[in-house]
Image (cartoon, rainbow, N blue to C red):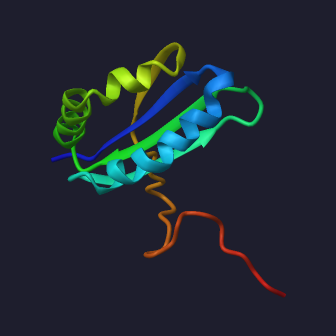
Amino acid sequence: MKEYVTCLTLRIAPERMAEFEAMMEVEAPLTREFDGCERFEAYADQSTPGVVLFFERWKSKEHEQRYTRWRTDRGDMQRLGAFFSASPTSTVLREFRDTKNPAPSGSNGSPASTNT
């Protein structure tokens, strides 16, 4: 199975952001604990009120699809949709790997710092 990485861009009604953030405090851990979720991060755009980005990494597309079905069956997608001021967009990502200069094992890919 091939890993599956997505970025969802949500547009939340700015007057509902505090309520949305409170809901995410409860719901984000459930996403992170779901079978196949390797990473889930949520960010609020500091320059555009109401824009929220979800970065999700799944073991496979099938894992993400099972998660989406679970959320839909629970009614979570309908509840989440009540916060939207516009339809969300989803982008499937492919990690760009630098094959000529791979990061050292255990590195996060950022340049090494030197303390002199």
In the displayed structure, would residue 18 be above or below residue 30?
Answer: above
- Residue 39 lies, in percent from the top left, at 39, 53
Query: Which residue is at the front of the view, 16 or 89?
Result: 16
Q: Please, is residue 64 above or below residue 16 in the view? A: below
Instruction: Please report the residue visible at 79 percent of the width from the left and 85 percent of the height from the top.
Output: 115
Q: Is residue 86 left or right of residue 30?
A: right
Nearest to the observer: residue 73 or residue 40: 73
In the image, farthest residue toward the bottom = 116
Q: Quadrant of residue 67?
A: top left
In this rendered view, identify the residue nearer to me: 70 or 98: 70
Which image quarter: residue 13? top right
Q: Position of residue 94 (x, y in %)?
A: 39, 39
Q: Position of residue 21 (x, y in %)?
A: 57, 40
The residue positioned 38% from the left and 25% from the top of the image is 79
Rendered view: 47 above or below 5: above
The C terminus, quarter of image: bottom right
Position in image of residue 14 (x %, y %): 68, 23
Which residue is depicted at the point 33% across and 50% down?
30
- Residue 41 versus residue 75: which sits nearer the camera? 75
Q: Residue at 48% x, 43% y: name it.
A: 24
Q: Residue furthest top?
A: 86
| Circle count | 0
